[in-house]
Image (spheres, rainbow, N blue to C red):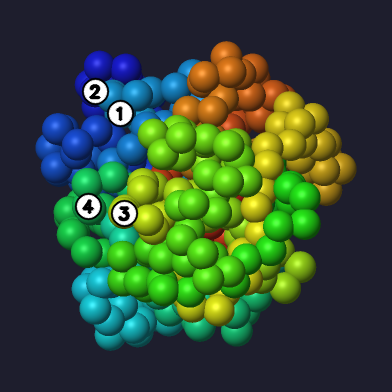
Amino acid sequence: MSQSGNLQEAVRGLDNPQLIMLLSNSGQFEDHVKKLEELYPRIPSIGCIGMSYDTKVVEKGVSVVAFYDVYAAANVLEEVSVMPVKYIERLEQDVRQINGSGNDTICIDFCSGNDACVLTTIHSVLKHRGISLVGGTGDAGKVSANGKVYQDAVAYTIVKNKSGRVKAYKENIYRQMGNHRFIASKTDKANYVIGKLNSMPAKQVYQDILHVSEQQIPTQTFKNPFGKINGSETCIISIKEVTGSALTCFRQVNDSDVLIMLELGDYKAIVKETVQTIKRDFPRISAVFSVNCLFRYLLFTDNHYMQEYLQEMGTLGNHAGLVGYGEHYNNQFVNQSMSCVVFE
């Protein structure tokens, strides 16, 4: 990593990697993509714009995550806002080439938007081999793959661990608050708007339950997001802003969706529990790559916990990751969560 955005400094000592991930800043992204390709031609690579971390956070610089002892392919699905499925053959070919299974292979993706549709598309290919996915949304609507910058696209890599298993995890630090259940209506799917909850204006419902002012709503969501029940899973939905009497969110809500109110749990204990679970599953760990939501980063930073969090995750071994604008876990697009992949 380089806090100042010096790519040469970030890649010092990096020889013959089999896969590279670039996490850069908006001002230098294109330049970094080009330079990285010159330094490591023909090495599969994906990249996006965003903050990153290992034992420290890089807010505006650059980080490079390199993989060894893996088989990897990297590529991109374009036109994700319109029809990502148009490029599905690329993914099918890469999955065939890597020839992995759910036990030893992971898909990692960096997306520029329309995440739910993108994940459904990718999952349609991965599910046949039981391959999991971990990823996130980058900033500024740009991603890179193999030395080229793309807009309106998802960059992905299929990574097969040569020396053991891989497994994806998702961490949720929220739990249901009370017995509040809402039926969403008057939604605007394209703009992620919830107009009404139980036939009442969504803003008013949220304010009445939590006794907060309109101005407090965009930060109150750190403690009280919505949850959408999806089988046995709860997908977290963050509030972005107030729009008249409605609430605009960071992911899509549809008419008739059942939502619940969530509250922040004992996140320090939950993180410890996640780390313990991973250690039980994997006595020998070579690396962990994670995606943490920007809102988790802000929450942890506000509570002076971010550094302690990175130390806790660091007890697993080599740990690096991206601060994303939405997290991907298999075919789910979630907010305010952490998803990660562990390599044996």
- Judging by the rendered image, the residue that carries numbered circle 4 is 142
Q: Earlier in the sequence, mark 4 or mark 2?
A: 2
**Which of the two labelled residues, at mark 1 and mark 4, occupies the earlier sequence position?**
1
Res 316 seen here: no
Please give the residue where the numbered disc 3 appears in the rendered image.
244
Residue 252: x and y in percent read: 43, 67
Q: Three-letter amino acid code at disc 1?
A: Val
Residue at 18% x, 59% y is 151
**Which label's residue is closer to the chain start, 4 or 3?**
4
Nearer the viewer's eye, disc 4 or disc 3?
Answer: 3
Q: Secondary structure at mark 3?
A: loop
Q: Do residues under tags 2 and 3 come within 8 Å of each other at their CB atoms?
A: no
Disc 4 secondary structure class: strand
Q: Secondary structure at mark 1?
A: loop
**Label 1 near label 2: C-beta < 8 Å?**
yes
Q: Which mark is residue 313?
A: none
Q: CA distance from mark 1 to mark 4?
A: 15 Å
- Position of residue 39 in the picture relative to residue 197 (left or right): left
Residue 311 image offset from top left, x and y in percent: 64, 20
1 and 3 marks in contact (CB < 8 Å): no
Q: Is residue 185 above or below residue 151?
A: below
Q: Which is closer to the viewer, label 2 or label 3?
A: 3
Q: Earlier in the sequence, mark 2 or mark 3?
A: 2
Res 148 seen here = yes
Q: Residue at x 14, y 42 (%)?
A: 30
How many marks on residues?
4
Sequence order check, earlier mark of 2 and 1: 2
Q: Mark 2 highlights which residue?
A: 5
- Please identify, in this view, whether the residue under mark 4 or under mark 2 is nearer the observer: 4
